[in-house]
Image (cartoon, grey):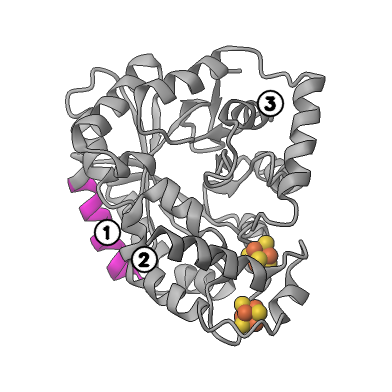
Amino acid sequence: MKQITLGKTGLCVTRLGFGGIPIQRVDEEQAVETVRHAVKRGVDFIDTSRAYTTSERRIGLALKNANKRIILASKSVSRTAKDLRKDLETSLKNLQREYIDLYQCHFVKNADDYQQIISSGGALEALVKAKEEGLIGHIGLTSHSLDLIEHALDDNIFETIMVCFSLLEPAAGDKIIPKAIDKQVGVIAMKTFSGGVLDNPQLALKYVLSYPGIALIPGVEHKNLFDANWKVFQSSWKLNNDEKNEIEIIRQRYDKIFCRRCDYCQPCSEDIPIQSILGLRYAVKRFGNAVLEKNWMKDGIKKARQCSACEECMERCPYNLPIPDLIQENLKWLDERG
Ligand code: SF4
Ligand code: SF4
């Protein structure tokens, strides 16, 4: 099935959507050209975020005179109703729309975050109001934590979930995705390429497509890259034995170095944002050097240099990653770039 309906939202989308992260790292002309090209090929579902700097604006420009209906999703990391409303108004302006099909609470990290969102005066309140006003169609949630998503599914509040799912992060496929589908909650898979780690995008894409009933939103910054993805989308998604073997080899290669961003290793005594530091080089690959200029990243790097190698985080990491060594490797990589 090349198309799916995102649960009870009723939004029918082409399974291969378009993610708005990579178009930040090229010039505006190329960004707009890439989005238009994807739409011309057949994409009808585009996801972006207030957090992706120029992405919303560029998508707005690309779709300005589009002659077909494109289902748009955006999101905000704001946790209060007041901040969320401000972000939504900016999103509408940037996207040049009077209505956004899906607006999501972005990157909900932990129970405290979630509680703040759903409490009185929280982001959810603003989204419910915006839905009543006809500014948005549906309300979704994105998180890297499967525990949190499961909790949210039990609460029956959100109409879609966005969850990490890739050949290096297959866990959501065992329980969370079937549960969401069963509850008619739309599933949008993110991190198809494991945040830039996987260097065989076609295989990575095929793996996610071979899981039925979910949409995915791999981002690209050039029409040729989009065409490579589109070609996979148009072919058979059945994995052959060689591909299954390759997946096993890739899993073994990354097993002890790939951070799954679950945050179970926290809290760190030095307050180091461990997952951000372990994903440093891939963040630069995806977002460009600009990510190094963000205050939260600068602060994280400064703290990472204070890692005492106490190894307390390692005891908590379910994947037994050698966290202090990986932190040092990433800092060395950063320093050698100059
Ligand atoms: S080893 Fe480093 S990162 Fe891990 S808890 Fe100790 S100080 Fe934090
Ligand atoms: S280091 Fe381990 S526990 Fe921490 S976020 Fe990564 S995978 Fe999860």
Which residue type carries mark 3?
A: Ser
Question: Left or right: where does residue 251 sit relative to residue 60?
Answer: right
Q: Which image quadrant: the N terminus? A: top right
Task: Point out which mark residue 338 bears.
Answer: none
* Magenta-tinted stretch: 78-93
Question: Left or right: where does residue 282 sit relative to residue 237?
Answer: left
- Residues packed near mark 2 inside 10 Å, few (<14), some (14 to 19) or many (20 plus): many
Question: Left or right: where does residue 181 sit relative to residue 226?
Answer: right
Q: Residue at x 63, y 27 (%)?
A: 209
Task: Point out which mark residue 210 bears.
Answer: 3
Whole-number angstrom distance, CA of label 3 to CA of label 2: 34 Å
Which residue type carries mark 1?
A: Asp
- Towards the viewer: 263 or 175: 263
* Residue corresponding to mark 1: 87
- Residue 102 in percent (x, y) is at 40, 43
Whole-number angstrom distance, CA of label 1 to CA of label 3: 35 Å
